[in-house]
Amino acid sequence: MDKRVEKFDRKIDKSRVKRKDSEDRETVEAVLDKRTAMILYGLINRGYLDGMKGIVSSGKESNVYWATVEKDGEVQDLAVKIYRTSTMDFNRIWVYIQGDPRFGRVKKGTRSIVYRWAEKEFKNLRLADEAGVRVPKPIISRGNVLVMEFIGEDGVSAPRLKEAVVDDPESVFEIIMDDVVKLYRNAELVHADLSEYNVLLWNEPVIIDVSQAVLLSHPLALEFLIRDLRNVLRYFSGLGVSVPSLEEAYTMVTGEELEWSQESS
């Protein structure tokens, strides 16, 4: 067996037992099942990863791990997002997947939908990155595993906007609004869950968690956009920024006027 795989195998075993709290152990076990481990082994053998260093964050539907890989003599930090196949809320995510022409027919309530969810985030990250939006650069998606750029340093993630000290909120607001415009006009995407919880602050704002982002062809795309704008305007207004009205922000993004029927959706 490849030495890197043996080393990674020990890392998995260690991560399974290092936490004393029973709920945390169950969380780790729910993510690092046998199929997921085999996907990670494959990524190691193909040179995408050298090893997993530790857990960065744990959520209801996924965990994010700090990993590294050596490229051209330099060690690079990576983020490995692993979606749970056992605790995913299929009813919640179904509205964001159904009707997406990139994925065709997806069976509801099966492991395949989790794999498509990971693939969806990978493709959305790639579209956003190509559109000039600051997001973690996607590297590869396999099964329920997504490998991407690590935003932070030495395994410590950059703070979410909600938790960060924002020295120049006006500038951060302008950058985020510019990114919303780029998402809409260049990538033809709506984030659909944009708020101070899904933006990291690392010298500049970095938009994350784009698995639920939808194409403009999605029937609820404009409703999701309005929700995103409301969240952004509310947050920065609370920081004392002189923000535009919802109608003005909507026109700024879409180039069209906000109809009353859309705003009341």
Image: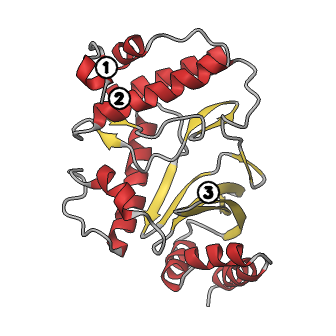
Residue 78, compared with residue 132, is above or below; it is: below
**Nearer the viewer's eye, disc 3 or disc 1?**
1
Task: Give me the C-alpha separation between circle 2 and circle 3.
Answer: 26 Å
- What kind of element bears circle 1? helix
**What residue appears at the point 72 percent right and 77 percent down from the top-left corner?**
15
Residue lying farthest to the bottom in this orientation: 1
Which residue type does callout 3 highlight?
Answer: Ala
Contact flag, marks 1 and 2 (Cβ < 8 Å):
yes
Q: Quadrant of residue 26?
A: bottom right
Q: Amino acid at mark 2?
A: Tyr
Mark 1 neighbour class, 10 Å CA radius: few under 14, some 14 to 19, many 20 or more = some
Q: Position of residue 70 (x, y in %)?
A: 67, 62
Question: How are the residues colored?
Answer: secondary structure
Quadrant in which the N terminus is drawn: bottom right
Q: Which of the labelled discs sits on residue 254, or is there none?
A: 1
Q: Is residue 155 left or right of residue 251?
A: right
Q: Is residue 38 left or right of residue 69?
A: left
Q: Which corner quadrant of the image does residue 227 belong to?
A: top left
The residue carrying mark 2 is 184
**In front here: 235 or 28?**
235
Expressed as whole percent of the image width and height from the top left, the position of residue 185 reads 33, 25
Disc marking residue 91: none
Residue closer to the observer: 26 or 15: 26
Secondary-structure class at tag 3? strand
Q: Is residue 226 above or below residue 108?
A: above
First in sequence: mark 2 vs mark 3: 3
Residue at screen point 54% across, 82% down: 33
Residue 79, numbered circle: 3
Name the amino acid type tagged 1: Thr
What is the C-alpha distance between the residues marked 3 and 1?
Answer: 33 Å
